[in-house]
Amino acid sequence: DTAVSQTPKYLVTQMGNDKSIKCEQNLGHDTMYWYKQDSKKFLKIMFSYNNKELIINETVPNRFSPKSPDKAHLNLHINSLELGDSAVYFCASSSRGHLLNTEAFFGQGTRLTVV
Amino acid sequence: KQEVTQIPAALSVPEGENLVLNCSFTDSAIYNLQWFRQDPGKGLTSLLLIQSSQREQTSGRLNASLDKSSGRSTLYIAASQPGDSATYLCAVHTGNQFYFGTGTSLTVIP
């Protein structure tokens, strides 16, 4: 079983479209994240949710809207896609509290290409 | 704000060599540090997790050390193999998020 799974793996779309990326974790973690990996391979936090509550929103354009229906899912919806949104988006999960010192797990990434 | 730097940015070694990858961070208030491996076009695979109270962790040919007070971690790879070729990333957890380093691209030449 895949610990953190994202769909789709590849997404090619035109400018101006709206798209969603789904993420699910089966590890029982209570914290989930979205990271963006740019063309230079640098990973930067976008959002962090803990038990469905937004913890971090790291100066991301409001065209990006995360949604967490339950603590096992954190989806990312992007409106009015722009060329600069092309990147690889990673979902991750980890534990908090007394379980903070456990491994974080990352999904396989979604490669978004806006044309 | 936490900044994480990895040196060198790229490394090429012949098979069988031992090597050390370096990671430094600016704020020592961390919960843990995790080393990841990323293969081209793939996701991140966790290699080792060091808790803030620990000095080192070992897994097979990998040994990671942590000196929290000086803001440094090293990943030691013994007897390198071509299959070790990948990008290695370190990440520090500050309680709310992971801050990633810039990565070291490793090539092991057969």
Image (tube, coloured by chain):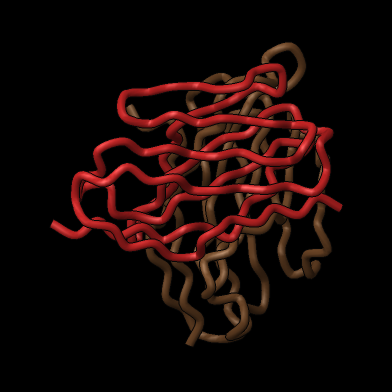
Chain colours: A brown, B red
Q: Which of A24 and B65 is in front in this view?
A: B65
Q: Which residue is drawn at 40% across and 51% down?
A: B38
View extreme (front): residue: B17
Location of residue B68 in the rendering, given as x and y in whole percent from the top left corner: 74, 31
Tell me the quarter of the picture where residue B18 sits. top left
Location of residue B13 in the rendering, given as x and y in whole percent from the top left corner: 28, 58
Q: Residue at x 67, y 24 (%)?
A: A30
Report the number of discs: 0
Tell me: residue B34, above or below residue A77.
above
Location of residue B80 in the rendering, given as x and y in whole percent from the top left corner: 25, 43
Q: Residue at x 55, y 48 (%)?
A: B22
View extreme (left): residue: B110
Query: Is residue A80 found left or right of A6 in the rendered image?
Result: right
Q: Which residue is drawn at 51% across and 81% down?
A: A114
Q: Nearer the viewer, residue A79 or B76?
A: B76
Tell me: residue A59, above or below residue A90.
below
In the rendered image, which quarter contains the N terminus of chain A?
top left
Location of residue B95 in the rendering, given as x and y in whole percent from the top left corner: 79, 32
Query: Is residue B42 found left or right of A97 in the rendered image?
Result: left
Tell me the quarter of the picture where residue A110 sits. bottom left
Q: Which of B64 and B94 is in front in this view?
A: B64
View extreme (right): residue: B1
